[in-house]
Amino acid sequence: TEGPPPTPVAAVSQYACQRRTTIENNNKIFTDAFEVLAESYEFSELEGPCLAFRRAASVLKSLPMAVPCLAATQGLPCLGEHTKAVMEEILRYGRAFEVEKTLSDERYQTLKLFTSVFGVGPKTAEKWYRRGLRSFSDILAEPSIQLNQMQQSGFLHYEDISRAVSKAEARALGNIIDEAVHAITPDGILALTGGFRRGKEFGHDVDFIVTTPELGMETSLIPIIINRLTRQGILLYCDYQASTFDKSKLPCHRFEAMDHFAKCFLILRLEGSQVEGGLNSAEGDSRDWRAVRVDLVSPPMDRYAFALLGWTGSRQFERDLRRFARMERGMLLDNHALYDKTKKEFLAATTERDIFAHLGLEYIEPWQRNA
Ligand code: DGT
Ligand code: MG
């Protein structure tokens, strides 16, 4: 009566950096539900449960098929009682009460709406909510509210920048930035990062790294690019942050999520004629241009691999790379460097592969980092 022994299935790691996660998500019904709950906990500053739901979602995203029943989750990491209860309801009824309740909650809806504006974070959204504001017209009609430049642009271009950026649009923007970089210096380097490097079809912005082989020269790159975009008449908004990167201060006590490289957060005007197949524009919109969010970051060349790895994402993949480095290897990883706490030394890298190798991790391709 004994059949052949079951084929051993490789255990799923609790770390996203030890899983291969493509853009194909077979468990969207669960992960969308988890994301709603995670976001709601984030609004309430409950980091623990927020992270728990994000980790659970990430594990399910890595699976090659849809979870058919709760029994099939046996042996999977990061799935606790709470997440399993939500999954069970979804399996039974197609939806979960807690998620439905959250989605219809006024506070959740309002904070979600407010944070969808470029330049409005959870803190500001919460402040406005506590003042009794519930809609954009409430905010814009409130005389005591002083919107900063970023928020003003956020409202001005709200329709355009809340609509997804297509791959073709990302490519067109790549051409514009590439032309700018190479007009400045023939050996300039441009790399696409963020979601589009991971193979996503759509994004909320387009992320690029720009640099030069000559150390120190990279700091002047972004200001010159900004100048050029201004003269071309396509710069709709620019928040430039000069580099605060200081090698002499390494190792820093806190390896931070936010990096110190020169960067800028832009809104650019993209012409339809520049996009193969045309713009991803709203129904009934007859304009032949749209506004798009673009981020540029400019690390010195000797930090290129760390910056590329850090800006390629996904956010969950990045979190788990850092957590794996700390917990499993006694190392500190951020967008600037990798530090071995035992050997008390920095580990140099010229490619992403070098960093994975230092960490003793199998290389994960960018398109497998959609954790
Ligand atoms: P999306 O929403 O389609 O643009 O998706 P992503 O994955 O491109 O997300 P995005 O653009 O917010 O960020 C791309 C990656 O870059 C993500 O892993 C986090 C990282 N990142 C974004 N902004 C910053 C920042 O200001 N500092 C640091 N250190 N990392 C950042
Ligand atoms: Mg992005």
Image (spheres, helix red, strand yellow):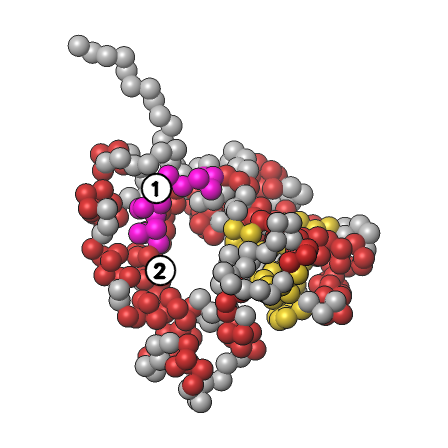
Give residue 371's quadrant in the image: top left
Say whether mark 1 is within 8 Å of ligand 1: no
Instruction: Give residue 275's position: percent from left, percent from top.
Output: 65, 53
Q: Is residue 248 left or right of residue 326?
A: right
In the picture of the structure, the residue carrying the numbered disc 2 is 39
How many numbered circles does the render carry?
2
- Residue situated in front as seen by the camera: 319 or 63: 63
Q: In the rendered structure, which amino acid carries the disc numbered 1?
A: Asn
Give the side of residue 78 with respect to residue 255, left or right: left
Q: Earlier in the sequence, mark 1 or mark 2?
A: 1
Vertical order, 282 against 119 (above or below): above
* Viewer-closest of 173 and 214: 173
In the picture shown, does residue 108 fall above or below 30?
below
Task: Name the mark on residue 67.
Answer: none
Magenta residue span: 21-35
Q: Nearer the viewer, mark 1 or mark 2?
A: 1
Residue in the image at 47% along x and 42% along y: 23
Which label number is shown at residue 27? 1
